[in-house]
Amino acid sequence: MPKAKLLVGIKVGTRSLLGAIVSRAINRLTVRQVQAITTVGRHSDGGGLYLRVTPGGARSWVFMAALSGKRTEIGLGAASSVPLASARRLATQMREAIALGTEPRAVLVSPEPARAAATFGSFADEYIESVQDGWKNRTHRDQWRNSLRDHAGGLRNLALEDVGTDAVLAALRPIWLSKPETASRVRGRIEKILAAAKARGLRPQDAINPATWRGHLDVLLPKQSKLTRGHHAALPYGEAPQFMVELAARSAVSARCLEFTIFTAARSGEALGATWSEIDLEQRVWLVPADRMKAGADHIVPLSEGAMRVLEARAPSSHKQTEAIFSIGGARRSNMAMSMLLRRMGCGAITVHGFRSTFRDWAGDVSNFPREIIEQALAHTISNKAERAYRRGTAVERRRALMEAWSSFLIGSH
């Protein structure tokens, strides 16, 4: 056969083979389906890629192809370690290798240069994208992204293979004692990301995970005090929605005052001293006068749906405008009233003021609101000139959005 006809025959044959592989629909499966499939057998994603489930429950990716006239199965790795997106990428590379007449298995032993040089940040983004469909709510997704952005920013531009113990410690130490719950979650998230990178061959297989706790970081970091935030014991924000359910079941005036304090992220003295004359129910705002503020300046508090429910339950029409909202017979409650309530609820280890820390941790970890808006909501004194200038505009509506998000989180409508 003439050489030209032979080459044409090879090209035509290659196209036919490639066409046979890709003629079927590809990308049939979703991440959620991959996680849910338990039926024994091979489940096609198209283009030669299958999820294989064994009778013992093992789940792995395989690529099926006709090589040298024989149907061949090539393993791509465990489904728990290789995300759907990565399996598809490997399958695409193998189809290309077959089209070029090369050995498709070479894809597994010749990693792409770009993947080998991946940074912690780029891989973290890819990892979250690949697993987030398995998380039940958006809040969990935001927690991952925001906590890594705010507390692991120093790792982001490091090559995956360069992330070591010192780098992890540098990320954790600033918040390890002041924000123990957040720090522990960040550590766990870093550990998972690095474990996934190792499973993908992007970190040395014999290298220890520098974010491992037992036998590693537990001997390098100081012991945390549970539920502590600075000087005030605080409730972890993940437990706040259930706490609010239990609090709502209480009929005491101190319970309503504590609800209002939590919804507004106010100091206890500010809430206890609030009068109806300070509340604008139509505009849904609370103006706390300067003489009752720690910073000595008027403070505008946007009232969320949750805060409004508390006020409406107190029936303002039956009170004098100058009377404290949470008084009994005109007598204002003391700071001890809410503290005693917490003890009766079996929460004596936390403080009323600690709920401001609960709010601050939630806002920093879960929400996407800028720091200056969060600090303004807490009526904190801002030392930076640029931030003080920003604060003069009050940005009430942006704070209203923040407080509504906090209210929705607390009452479970997120």
Image (tube, helix red, strand yellow):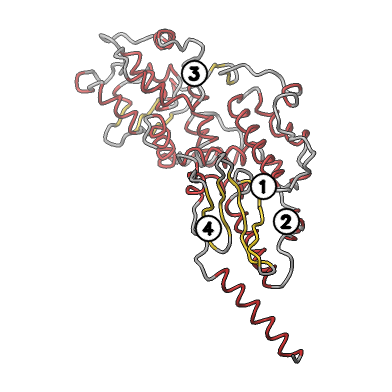
- Residue 88 vertical placement versus 277 (above, below): below
The extreme left residue here reads 318
Give the residue type that dot 1 points to: Gly
Query: Which x, y percent locates residue 244?
Result: 38, 23
Quick one: label 3 or label 2, which is nearer the N terminus?
Answer: 2
Residue 121, labelled with which disc?
A: 1
Q: Please identify the quarter of the rendering in which residue 248 is found.
A: top left
Mark drawn on residue 181? none
Number of the label disc, if any, that sits on residue 108 = 2
- Of all residues, the one furthest to the front in this rendering is 70
Mark before the other along the chain sequence, 4 or 1:
4
Q: Where does the N terminus fall, quadrant-wise? A: bottom right
Residue 350: x and y in percent read 50, 14
The residue lying toward the viewer, choosing from 4 and 25, is 4
N-terminal of the pair, mark 3 or mark 1, is 1
Query: Quick check: 350 left or right of 222?
Result: left
Nearest to the eye among marks 2 and 1: give it. 2
Query: Residue 285, located in which quarter of the rendered image?
Result: top left
Closer mark to the observer between disc 4 and disc 1: 4
Foreground label between 4 and 3 = 4
The residue positioned 35% from the left and 13% from the top of the image is 254
Dot 4 corresponds to which residue?
45
Q: Secondary structure at mark 2?
A: helix
Q: Which residue is mark 3?
A: 353
**What amino acid is at disc 4?**
Asp
How far is disc 2 from disc 1 in space, using C-alphas? 24 Å
Residue type at mark 2: give it. Answer: Leu
C-alpha distance separating marks 4 and 3: 53 Å
Mark-to-mark CA distance, 3 and 2:
56 Å
